[in-house]
């Protein structure tokens, strides 16, 4: 099968298109024929070696944790999935090796959820990691109606989902973004503010008493968070462990078929919009990683497998 791989740590220059054997399918696993995968910042953080102290990496690595595709075959004792089923997955296993940037990927059956029927393969592949991150952080922070929520980096891949899910819970949402993305955030139901110096003052103009909850999706904003958080307010970060020293929660998204199934339902009900920035073929996947690293992409970049 064709697969994107890297055999050493580095930037996009270490990526190459190679031929690999089709993955084996152990008991309790399924083989998915990949239709689309999606790029996440964690992919190139792993590729750069930044997460080597945390994750077990086995070279050569096929990157990618997001996937949409079709069940090709099921291993022993997998009654819940059949060949032909259309699925999505946050495909993180216990080690980094056989990812989703390939024509086939083998995964534990417990990681799969039904693909939302209302969207194409590229958008479906763009949902799992970012959507689950937003869903789980809002759940951990117990975001509820009549609360005011500040989302740092609200126009990013996770941020767009966090805004929509918080609004759906009945919360008032203030989102940080560059001015070019303010109309986008308004369309999602948020009140946009420019990030950077002076942010606490701009947030206080909108919420003089402060905010109940802060969701940090960018890192390096602890002081700004504390400056606008109400006494007794809650905050969490998926990008900065420094929040733990200030009463916050540092989170890492967990694979959950149950949560992902709920997100799929929300998409099919029209309650959750998937923002796709770009779609490229597998042969151009290295360029997709370069675009992601530049940090100016709104939404997700998908990689098609033909």
Image (cartoon, helix red, strand yellow):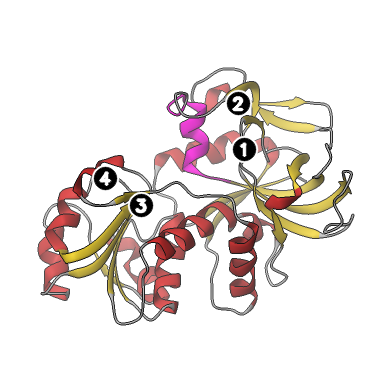
Seen from the viewer's position, the closer of residues 78 and 8 is: 78
Q: Secondary structure at mark 2?
A: loop
Q: CA distance from mark 1 to mark 4?
A: 36 Å
Are the two marked residues, 3 and 2, in contact with CB atoms closer than 8 angstroms? no
The residue indicated by pointer 2 is: 15
Which residue is rendered at x = 35% and y = 75% of the image? 186
Q: Position of residue 304 (x, y in %)?
A: 70, 47
- Of residues 7 and 129, the one drawn nearer to the viewer in this rendering: 129
Label 4: state its secondary structure. Answer: helix
Is 44 colored magenta in this rendering? yes
Viewed as shown, does residue 36 lie left or right of 55?
Answer: right
Measured in 3D between alpha carbons, the distance from the residue under mark 1 to the one under mark 3, in whole angstroms, is 24 Å
Q: What range is drawn magenta here?
A: 39-51
Q: Is 277 placed above or below 262 here?
A: above
* Lower sequence index among marks 3 and 2: 2
Numbered circle sitting on residue 285:
1
Q: For marks 4 and 3, give the one nearer the viewer.
A: 4
The disc placed on residue 217 is 3
Mark toward the viewer: 1 or 3: 3
**C-alpha distance separating marks 4 and 3:** 15 Å
Q: Mark 1–mark 3 contact, CB under 8 Å?
A: no
Q: What's the CA distance linking mark 2 and mark 4? A: 35 Å
Q: Residues within 10 Å of mark 3 (few under 14, many from 20)?
A: many
Q: Are marks 1 and 2 in contact (CB under 8 Å)?
A: yes
Residue 169 located left or right of residue 26: left
Q: Residues within 10 Å of mark 2 (few under 14, many from 20)?
A: many
Sequence-wise, the earlier of marks 1 and 4 is: 4
- Counting residues from the N terminus, which is met first, the one under dot 2 or under dot 4? 2
Say if 66 sits above or below 261 in the image: above
- Ranked by sequence position, the earlier of labels 1 and 3 is 3
Numbered circle sitting on residue 244? 4
């Amino acid at each position: 099968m064709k697969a994107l791989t890297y055999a050493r740590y580095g930037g996009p220059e270490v990526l190459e298109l190679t031929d690999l054997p089709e993955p084996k399918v152990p008991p309790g696993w399924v083989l998915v024929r990949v239709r689309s995968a999606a790029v996440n910042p964690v992919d190139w953080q792993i590729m750069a070696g930044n997460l080597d102290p945390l994750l077990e990496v086995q070279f050569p690595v096929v990157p990618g944790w997001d996937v949409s595709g079709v069940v090709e075959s099921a291993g022993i004792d997998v009654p819940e999935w059949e060949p032909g089923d259309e699925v999505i997955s946050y495909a993180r296993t216990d080690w980094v090796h056989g990812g989703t940037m390939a024509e086939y990927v083998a995964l534990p059956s417990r990681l799969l959820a039904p693909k939302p029927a209302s969207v194409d393969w590229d958008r479906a592949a763009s949902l799992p990691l970012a959507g689950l991150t937003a869903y789980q952080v809002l759940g951990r922070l117990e975001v509820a109606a009549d609360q005011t929520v500040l989302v740092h980096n609200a126009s990013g891949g996770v941020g767009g989902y966090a805004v929509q899910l918080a609004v759906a819970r009945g919360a008032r949402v203030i989102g940080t973004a560059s001015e070019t993305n303010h109309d986008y955030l308004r369309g999602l139901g948020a009140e946009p503010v420019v990030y950077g110096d002076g942010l606490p003052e701009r947030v206080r103009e909108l919420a003089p008493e402060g905010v109940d909850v802060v969701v940090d999706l960018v890192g390096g904003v602890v002081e700004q968070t504390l400056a606008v958080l109400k006494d007794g307010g809650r905050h969490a970060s998926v990008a900065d462990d420094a929040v733990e020293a200030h009463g916050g929660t540092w989170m890492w998204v967990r694979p959950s078929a149950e949560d992902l199934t709920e997100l799929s339902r929300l998409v099919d009900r029209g309650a959750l919009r998937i923002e796709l920035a770009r779609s490229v073929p597998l042969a151009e996947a290295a360029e997709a990683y370069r675009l992601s690293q530049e940090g100016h992409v709104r939404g997700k970049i998908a990689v098609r497998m033909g």
